[in-house]
Image: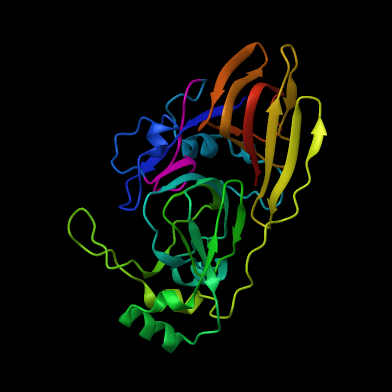
Amino acid sequence: MREPIFLRPTGKDYLWGGSRLNDEFCKEIPMVPLAETWECSTHPDGPSFAVGGEFDGQSLTEILKAHPEFLGTHPDSGAELPILVKFIDARKDLSVQVHPTDEYAAAHENGQRGKTEMWYVLDAAKGSHLVYGLNRDVSGETMRKSIADGTLGSFLQKVPIQKDDVFFIEAGTIHAIGAGALIAEIQQSSNLTYRLYDYDRVDKNGEKRPLHIGKALAVANLKTSAEPRQPMRVLRYRPGCASELLCRCKYFEVHRLLVNTERRQRVTFRADPMSFRVLLCVGGCGALGYGTQSRNLYKGDCVFLPADSVEIRFHGQMQLLDIRG
């Protein structure tokens, strides 16, 4: 039976993180700070694990290795989970960074994937912003000099953000999440990050985190970036649920589901044979049923739905990200 698999994440204690993922999402991960939770992941740097059901305690990596059919029949499915889903709590600014393309990563990082990603803003403090590309064309030599003399910020395009904003960050785009942002991130399954600038901060051991200026400049788009605009979002309604497309690219597709059922009403849902789906609860609460079973679903919960899954039923008032590979 291809039943839904509830997941427990791996946490990351990066120095810029806060406490909201424990305080508001009840992650119960003993880390201070708790910067990220890798909610659906088979990456060796932070796999997620099944909670309950027949796979209880197993990593998602182990499960998919034993059941590759869970990934689906799409020709691009491959033998590994191609995406990684995270929550990010930025109490402080993240480093100014860039990610490589598939081609560069394959050639220079032992065949790893590149990293294209999407951010969905769950919350943003007043004045929060992100860095999205450059505000003018810059040469590599000028970039190196600005990093050395601390003037890099004058070339960065800073964009104000607010709750429910969506941003698509293609590999090669210089970027950074600003302080006060709470983000759901959907990305390729990769942990390749090249830092350009990290504010001369030191970690808990008193050491500066390494920069990767040579690799960063080799992959970065140094042309002026168009100011990102929010995509046209059209709600499609059916009884008990509305949905909207947030992002579609060659690596993933993300929809937002707004479930609001009446007392006896249920919304049915399943993954088709082509691809798995990942359901990330980003607000509210409810129940997820399948067969004769039912489990509560709370803000912060993440569920892996195997390809060609059993039919599931939603009930309650909640917001979900529906992520397809």
User: What residue is drawn where x is 52% and y is 20%?
Assistant: 53
Where does the image place residue 308, in percent across and percent down from the top left?
Answer: 71, 32
Left or right? Give the position of 15 relative to 89.
left
User: In the image, is residue 194 above or below residue 277?
Assistant: below
User: What residue is drawn where x is 54% and y is 59%?
Assistant: 160
Left or right? Give the position of 104 relative to 71.
left
Residue 48 belongs to the span the image colors magenta: yes
Residue 246 seen by the camera = yes
Which quadrant of the view contains residue 37?
Answer: top left
Where does the image place residue 184, in percent across and percent down from the top left?
Answer: 53, 45
Left or right? Give the position of 145 relative to 87.
left
User: What colour scheme has been applied to the protein in the rendered image?
Assistant: rainbow
User: What residue is drawn where x is 57% and y is 46%?
Assistant: 163
Region in magenta: 35-52
Which quadrant of the view contains residue 102?
Answer: bottom right
Residue 1 seen by the camera = no
Q: Residue furthest left?
A: 206
User: What residue is drawn where x is 62% and y is 53%?
Assistant: 166
User: In the image, is residue 195 above or below residue 140?
Assistant: above
Q: Nearer the viewer, residue 119 or 39?
A: 119
User: Split into 4 quadrants, where in the image is the N terminus?
Assistant: top right
